[in-house]
Image (cartoon, helix red, strand yellow):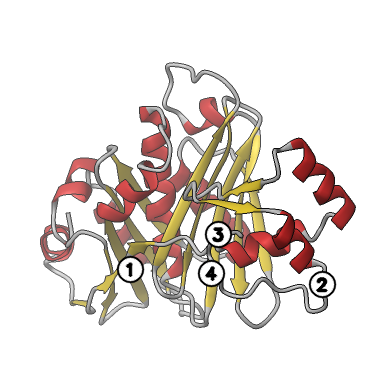
């Protein structure tokens, strides 16, 4: 695999085609350590993380990219996100016991794949496609064909320990590149999942494209990070009235606990905190502990 927890772009000098390859290990394990997921879910979450890191490489602004697969099957939700600093997090939500199959369609059933871009400043964008592909990579390729009209090839792999992704894409606004694209994509299709997980980036690109002028850019580090905070949880509580929160306090032995679904961090709020929320300013400050 490429240097663990990195993302690296590459470009064909003589073709209007770009690419990116990513490898995840520690960041992937950080996600899995937060919940006891079955093996099939671990693999799918690895693919989601690899996919969202690949797609985030195209971000040219501060913000985040979210990838969400939602269905009516045994898995009701898979979600991964990556920001412009290459910080990742992901989560899965299950309905019941999983079938023997590891197929995306069998595990999620009828549903959709959503790609959301959230700039720090600017308008939020979301695109969706039905979950009709046989795996996540195929669904993402359908998205780019339907929503972006941009020829794209994606390969994903994960084994519960490592995750990796490989993407090729025609440059936006490129002239006719049909023959070149067919050749480059055909070579990419010879790449096997175990090679994607085990080869470093230089070996991988040489194995596929030693006859092409291919330029590899510097690798960028990827890490797990959850941006939850006590202050953000407090602001979420303010969607309820002070009376409703005080009633919850009485029912929960004087403490309202809020859990982050991504990292399982737990934040507690007592009566003094709730009173401070609804006082003038409604701000708890930077404190990390309740009173």
Quarter of the C terminus within the rendering:
bottom right
Name the spot of residue 186 as percent of width and height, x first. 29, 53
Of the numbered discs 3 and 2, the one sitting upstream in the chain is: 3
What residue is rendered at 82% in x and 67% in y? 278
Give the secondary structure at mark 3: strand
| Residue pictured at 36% horizontal, 60% vertical | 167
Residue picked out by circle 4:
64
Label 1 or label 2, whichever lies nearer to me, is 2
Which of the 4 image quarters holds residue 182?
A: bottom left
Q: Considering depth in this image, is 211 or 154 the residue closer to the camera? A: 154
- C-alpha separation, residue under disc 4 versus residue under disc 3: 7 Å
Mark carried by residue 279 = 2
Label 1 environment density (alpha carbons within 10 Å; few <14, some 14–19, many ≥20): many
Q: Which residue is mark 3?
A: 66
Residue 75: mark: none
User: Which of pointers 3 and 2 indicates the residue nearer the eye?
Assistant: 2
In front: mark 1 or mark 3?
3
Look at the picture and state if 161 lies above or below 231.
Answer: above
Say which residue appears at 10% left-offset and 60% top-offset. 203
CA distance for labels 1 and 3: 20 Å
Q: Which mark is residue 19?
A: 1
Q: Residues within 10 Å of mark 4 (few under 14, many from 20)?
A: many
User: Spatial distance from mark 1 to mark 2, Cα to Cα?
Assistant: 52 Å
Q: Mark 4 and mark 1: span between their CA atoms? A: 20 Å
Q: Are marks 4 and 3 in contact (CB under 8 Å)?
A: yes
């Amino acid at each position: 695999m490429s240097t663990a927890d990195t993302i690296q772009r590459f470009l064909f000098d003589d073709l209007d085609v770009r690419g990116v390859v990513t490898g995840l290990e520690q960041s992937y394990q950080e996600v899995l350590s937060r919940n006891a997921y079955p093996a099939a879910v671990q693999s799918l979450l690895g693919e989601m993380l690899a996919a969202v890191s690949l797609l985030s490489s195209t971000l040219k602004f501060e913000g985040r990219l979210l990838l969400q697969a939602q269905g009516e099957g045994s898995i009701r939700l898979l979600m991964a996100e990556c920001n412009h600093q290459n910080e990742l997090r992901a989560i899965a939500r299950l309905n019941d016991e999983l079938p023997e199959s590891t197929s995306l369609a069998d595990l999620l059933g009828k549903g959709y794949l959503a790609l959301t871009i959230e700039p720090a400043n600017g308008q939020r964008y979301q695109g969706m496609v039905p979950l009709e592909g046989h795996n996540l990579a195929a669904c993402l390729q359908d998205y780019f064909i339907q929503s972006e009209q941009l020829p794209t090839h994606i390969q994903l792999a994960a084994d519960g320990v490592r995750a990796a992704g490989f993407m090729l894409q025609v440059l936006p606004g490129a002239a006719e590149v049909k023959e070149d694209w067919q050749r480059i994509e055909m070579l990419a299709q010879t790449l096997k999942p175990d090679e994607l997980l085990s080869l470093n980036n230089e070996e991988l690109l040489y194995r596929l494209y030693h006859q092409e002028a291919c330029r590899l850019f510097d690798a960028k580090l990827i890490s797990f990070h959850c941006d939850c905070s006590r202050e953000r949880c407090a602001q979420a509580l303010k969607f309820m009235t002070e009376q409703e929160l005080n009633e919850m306090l009485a029912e929960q032995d004087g403490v309202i606990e809020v859990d982050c679904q991504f990292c399982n961090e737990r934040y507690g709020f007592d009566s003094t905190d709730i009173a401070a929320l609804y006082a003038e300013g409604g701000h708890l400050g930077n404190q990390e502990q309740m009173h």
